[in-house]
Amino acid sequence: MNYNNSVLIGNWNEERLKNEFELKLFLRKRERHELLLQKSRTLFSNLLKERPLAISGTYVLFGYNVQIVATDMSGFASSGKSRYGLALSSLVSERQVDYIQNIDDGCLMTLSPITTPCCRNTFVILSAKDESLRGVKMNYGDEFLLRAENYGDPQSPPLYVRYTPEGAPSSTDRMPIQLSSSKDSCCRWTTMPLLPRDRLEGLGSPVKTSTKLIIKNCVADKNLCVMSQNWMRTFFGPECGVTCKNYLDIHKRCTAENIFSLVSDVETKTKG
């Protein structure tokens, strides 16, 4: 064989060994379910598994699953058309999917256009005074906790929706609401009627499902609100940030960013 300018030269053995090593590494990761595709599928299976809401009747009852829905804010459906309703949901980011395939301590909270009841957007509403209460009507002014259930690992410690007050001025896109395993006063929330004229008389009356109301953090004394200018791309599509801030119009009434409803009834949710 004569060598000339058309003869190709390369590290043939090195390339072959490299390809064999990458193939063996791929097969080993696939057997151990360590591939990113497999982890993503597990994440979707755990967090998007539907959880039917228990029929609790006309009123919100302690011990039942509820959804926190911003009824007056529009989201984006898969078809590209806007629709109203954003559900408070737990989020596992792209950086966490390598070692987390379920909700965990430190997961951020967002508002998602996906309002179908599932593991990531349903919470057990508990009385802050007595968590063992079940079937008791919740009244305006009662302090409550929102506990997220890890259905993939029932032995895991309970997680609560917690607001972290800012100790110093921070950026406007800061997202201070997340899941936490530490149950302290920052996990306490309360409700009050939407209209200011109804708040004095409505204090102590039962909360009806799907009624528009204000949710306030007991420590920060600020309303739960939609960060309408802070949209982000996630594994579950575009989602909006959530924080605690008071939005008032010129008449001192809360705007759409602060209006939420507690959905604990499938029939009520369908009507809304």
Image: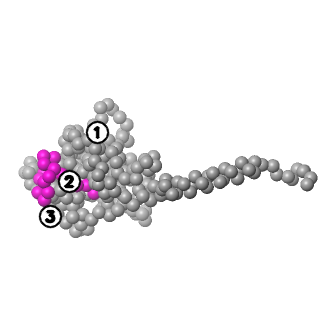
Tell me the residue at 20%/48% (across/down).
145
**Mark 1 sits on what residue?**
164
Prevailing secondary structure of the magenta residues:
loop
Mark 1 / mark 3, whichever is N-terminal: 3
Q: Position of residue 135 (x, y in %)?
A: 13, 59
- Asked if residue 33 can be seen in this view, the reply is yes
Of residues 46 and 115, the one drawn nearer to the viewer in this rendering: 46
Residue 192, numbered circle = none
| Residue 151 coordinates in the image, percent (x, y) | 31, 57
The number of callouts visible is 3
Given the image, on which type of amino acid does mark 3 rest? Thr
Which of discs 1 and 2 lies nearer the camera? The answer is 2
* Residue bearing the label numbered 3: 58
User: For the residue labelled by badge 2, is the local secondary structure a helix, a strand or a loop?
Assistant: strand
CA neighbours of label 3 inside 10 A, class few (<14), some (14 to 19), many (20+)? some
When the figure is inspected, residue 250 is found, relative to residue 118, above or below; the finding is: above
Instruction: Give the mark nearest the N terminus, 3 or 2.
Output: 3
Quick one: SS at disc 3?
A: loop
Which residue was labeled with disc 2?
Answer: 125
Marks 1 and 2: CB-CB under 8 Å? no
User: What's the CA distance linking mark 3 and mark 2?
Assistant: 16 Å
Which quarter shows the N terminus?
A: bottom right
Of circles 3 and 2, which is in front? Answer: 2
Residue 143 is situated, as x and y percent measured from the top left of the image, at 15, 47
Asked whether the viewer can see residue 236, the reply is no
Say which amino acid is labelled 2.
Ile
Q: Which residue range is magenta in the image?
A: 122-140
Q: Position of residue 146 (x, y in %)?
A: 23, 50
Would residue 108 be counted in the magenta stretch? no
